[in-house]
Image (cartoon, rainbow, N blue to C red):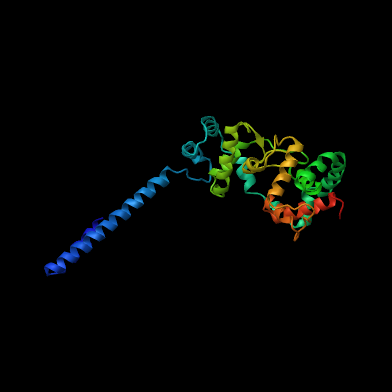
Amino acid sequence: MTGSRGFATAIFAAVTTAADRAAAIAVAAITVAATTVGALAVLVCLGTNADAAQCGSGPAGFEAWKRAFSEEARAKGIGASSVAALMQANYASGTIAADRSQRSFGLSLDQFLAKRGAAAIVARGRALKHSQAALFASIQQRYGVPPGPLIAIWGMETGFGSQRGNQNMLSSIATLAYDCRRPEFFTEQLYATLRLIDRGALSPGARGSMHGEVGQTQFMPKNILAYGTGNLDVAANALSSTANFFKAHGWRAGAGYQPGEANFAAIEAWNAASVYQRAIAQMGRQIDGGE
């Protein structure tokens, strides 16, 4: 502000005629006004940023972040019980460690398949395809998705339901929403989690994997809201929900799902890692009877 007034004084002193002085006064007034508006805008912006939940890279700021985020959540209509549950969430150090060490997605396809036990998944998957034939026929009739890719995901994600994780889902997702690595993505997931708790569709104490995935095929909260059909800890519901996800992402009954074929895009939508996508397509083909 001092600089703008000095500028105005300099202009005024440099002119001599009344007309020039009048013009100079007008210019100076505009300059001062513009500077004042700019300064006020900066102050408003700083105030807004100070009030917003700020991401962090360690546990020290997590409690302050929860308080700020809780205020934002209330303003967006999240219920009191869900906000209270969020305030009880703990910083999940194990989730952060897991998020920083996802090295298997950098492996070659053969290495990835070996590390994930693809041969065992395919062998058991073929047996399940036959023993649960009625279930898979019903899913295929409704959604157009054959058993192979669904069974491959089921085996890959949880070992057919045997390894669903034991992390507090809300703490995991809140920690990742707070963490500066991917706050936008996980903030959306956190709001979805709170809405599920609001609806009574999810317990605040729900347990899942390191990144907050839950159920037999490991659904993230936003996908539960959009595509979930019932309790996802029940295999039939989880498999149907996964098929529902595929159909919503353009799956066409009878079309292929290998790389370059029409339905591969739905597998790509399920998981962003290229090696994972190709693994599911290959295992699915083997389960469905191809090699």
| Residue at image point 36% right, 48% down | 44
**Nearer-the-camera pick, 80 or 248:** 248
- The quarter of the image holding the N terminus is bottom left
Q: Is residue 131 visible?
A: yes
Residue 251 in picture, x, y percent from top left: 73, 52
113 horizontally vs 220: left or right = right
In the rendered image, the vertical position of residue 115 relative to residue 202, given as above or below: below
38 horizontally vs 28: left or right = right
| Residue at image point 84% right, 47% down | 122
| Residue at image point 20% right, 62% down | 26
In the rendered image, the vertical position of residue 148 relative to residue 204, given as above or below: below
Determine which quarter of the picture holds residue 155.
top right
Which residue sits furthest front?
A: 142
In the rendered image, the vertical position of residue 132 relative to residue 249, given as above or below: above
Q: Can residue 162 be seen in this view?
A: no
Determine which quarter of the picture holds residue 158.
top right
Residue 159 in picture, x, y percent from top left: 77, 41
44 horizontally vs 119: left or right = left
Residue 28 in picture, x, y percent from top left: 22, 62
- The quarter of the image holding the C terminus is bottom right
**Nearer-the-camera pick, 274 or 285:** 285
